[in-house]
Each structure stands twice: as structure tokens, then as C-alpha cells.
Image: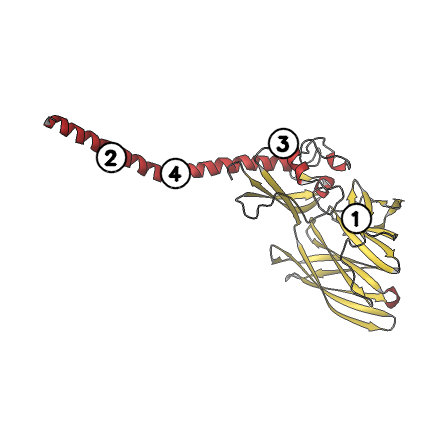
Amino acid sequence: MPTISIDTFFACTLILIVVFVSMAATASVAAPHIRGFQDLNEEAYLRKIAEYTVTSPGSPTNWGQIQSSSPDVFGLAKENSFSYDLDVDKVSRLSNQSIYALTYLELLTALRLEKVALSYSITQIMDITILMTSNVTVGDSTTYNFNVTVSRDQTPLATNLQCYVVARDFFNSTTSNTAIDGKGIVQTSIPNNSNGPVLLIVFARNPYDSRLTAQGSYIFAHLSLEPQPNNTFVNLSPLNNTLTITPNISGINLESGNVFTYGYESTLLPTSNSSYIVPEFLDSSPQVLAVTGWNGSDFFIEWATYPQVPLALGADFKFAETFSFKYLVTIDEVFYQLNVKCGGPSL
């Protein structure tokens, strides 16, 4: 081979090596940036999906009140409302405690999305912890003391407390407050002849903004055996201002029903042996619905919240990469925390 050809061969080979090395180095440097753009685009895409389901009422726009069907298009917003104002019945149909709850398959069908998984969880804006500290029987009654702690994201809050006590043939209400350290004391006295389970309902409200209102419930034994867990005897499903009661045990006899908010309480009006009308109150507050009854000789109290929060529905992302979008929403003029998790097409 002529000398000129050998020199040309090695020169071309050297140029090719330099080009390949440069391309490899460029790809190595650019790869993270490209992946970053892909993540950014994917996050923006999934955020738009989450935003739509939170700000759209879906179709039909009143699907939350239609007990016998699932939505054609999923959306949680209240019809003709402000942004991030959710419909109480649409929210309640996400709760697995309701007999009207959507299944995950119904949710996916109504979302009309392929290769995208979602989950929804809603919690109260404030956390309420109730702990019994003492009880003393004197004469014909027993006095109970409770420590109540209110916080938000583990930060203690000073709040006003409105409390209700429901027992057999007995009802009482009392007020209290939590100090700047988030702690307060609630005291109540119960007649001894009202022995059995007792339900203590505590509402906490920010003194300056009624939308910051939350509820907590605590059931305890009053001169009796420990009460059964909630939903042992009946299931309570509020929807469209009607409380539907589904027995979990045969032979149940209902006695009465009541509804409680921060500022009001009322007896529920029965429409049949298994349903009550839930009145509407002009109060920025969750509602607690309590029903009393008998299982043979055993007295019981069961309760549910309206909306049925906390709740969670959707995909299990325990071992999957997701994008999480958090929203401060209102439901019946009360603040709640909504978390939407999305798994995208490439996840």
C-alpha cells in the first residue's frame, strides 16, 4: 500500500475515533438534562389531569347525588362553584365506608385515560386527639375528664371546642378550648342509669376563620363492657341529605338518629325503617351523624361523618414512582387537604 494511502487511512480512523468519543461524551452530559425535560413534561401532563378532576364537575354534573350510577366523566367540583370547591356527595362516594362508593374500575372508566393511574385521598385540615384521663363516680352520676389536643401538621393550635355527649337516654353539650399549646380539657357528667357505650363528639374551630373547623369522635364504656368498633351493627351512608342505614347484623332495632355540627344539633327525621332526612345548616362545619339502637338487649351507638372524610380511593402506589399534587379545597365551606397521586405512561 502506498505511503499516502496508509497515512490517509490512519488519519480517517483517528477522526472517526474522535467523533465517536465526542458523541459519547455529549450523550453522557446531555442524558440527565433530557431525562429532566421528560420528567418535567410528564409532571406537567399529569398535573393537568389532576387539576381537571379537581376543578371540573364531571358529567353528569350532579353525578354525586345519583345513587345508582357512576359518572360518565369524573370530576369532583361542585357545579357552578369557585375553584377547588368540591361537592360533598361526590367526595363521599370516594369513601369505602359508603354503600354508594365508586369502585376503582368505575373511577378508571370515568377518567377515560390509558396508561395513567391515579389515587385520591382527603383529610381534615386539623387533627384532633381525644384521651380520657380520669373518671369519678359520685352519687348517681360519673364525671369523666378528657384531654383534647388540636394540631395542624404537628403544630399545636389554639381553638374553640364544641362538644356533644350521646348516651342511652341521655344527651349533653359543653364548650371548652385549646390553649396556644394545642391542649384543652373537656369534662362531662353522665347519669349512672345511662350505662352502656357513650359517644363524645368534639368540634374544633379556629377563632378567626370558621372554615378551619374539624371534628373528632371518641366512644367509651360507661359502667359497662367495652363498646364494639364503629360499623359493627349498622353501616351509615349519607348522600344527597339522606342517611341510609344498612344493618350488618340481623334483628337490629333502631331507636333514634341525630346530626351534629359545630353550631347546631338536631334530631333526624325518619322517612322509613332504614333512612333519615339530614337537615341543612348554615354552618361552616363537618356533620357527624349518630344513630342509636338495640341488638337484642345490647344498646349501641354508630356514627358517620358527612362528608365521609378521611378517605382514600385509587391505585396502590406503594412500590411505584409517582407525582403527588396537593390542594387546599373547600367542602361545604370547610377547608380540607386533597392529595392526588398520579403514575404516568413511562412510570
What residue is at 60 percent from the left and 40 percent from the top?
A: 118
What residue is at 78 percent from the left and 64 percent from the top?
A: 226
Q: Residues within 10 Å of mark 1 (few under 14, many from 20)?
A: many
Q: Which residue lies under the disc numbered 4?
A: 31
Residue 82 is situated, as x and y percent measured from the top left of the image, at: 67, 36
Residue 145 or residue 281, whichever sits in front: 145
Q: Which residue lies under the disc numbered 2?
A: 18
Q: Earlier in the sequence, mark 2 or mark 3?
A: 2
Judge whether 196 appears above or below 247 on screen. below
Q: Label 2 amino acid?
A: Val
Q: Quadrant of the N terminus?
A: top left
Q: Label 4 amino acid?
A: Ala
What residue is at 31 percent from the left and 37 percent from the top?
A: 24
Q: Label 1 amino acid?
A: Leu
Q: Which residue lies under the disc numbered 1?
A: 236
Asked which quadrant contains residue 37, the reply is top left
Q: Residues within 10 Å of mark 4 (few under 14, many from 20)?
A: few
**Spatial separation of the CA atoms under disc 4 and disc 1:** 54 Å
Residue 302 is situated, as x and y percent measured from the top left of the image, at: 80, 54
**Spatial separation of the CA atoms under disc 3 and disc 4:** 33 Å
**Spatial separation of the CA atoms under disc 4 and disc 2:** 20 Å
Element carrying mark 1: strand
Residue 333 is situated, as x and y percent measured from the top left of the image, at: 71, 44
Q: Earlier in the sequence, mark 3 or mark 1?
A: 3
Residue 45 or residue 5, whichever sits in front: 5
**Spatial separation of the CA atoms under disc 1 and disc 2:** 74 Å
Element carrying mark 4: helix
Give the label on residue 112, or none.
Answer: 3
What residue is at 35 percent from the left and 39 percent from the top?
A: 29
Asked which quadrant contains residue 32, the reply is top left
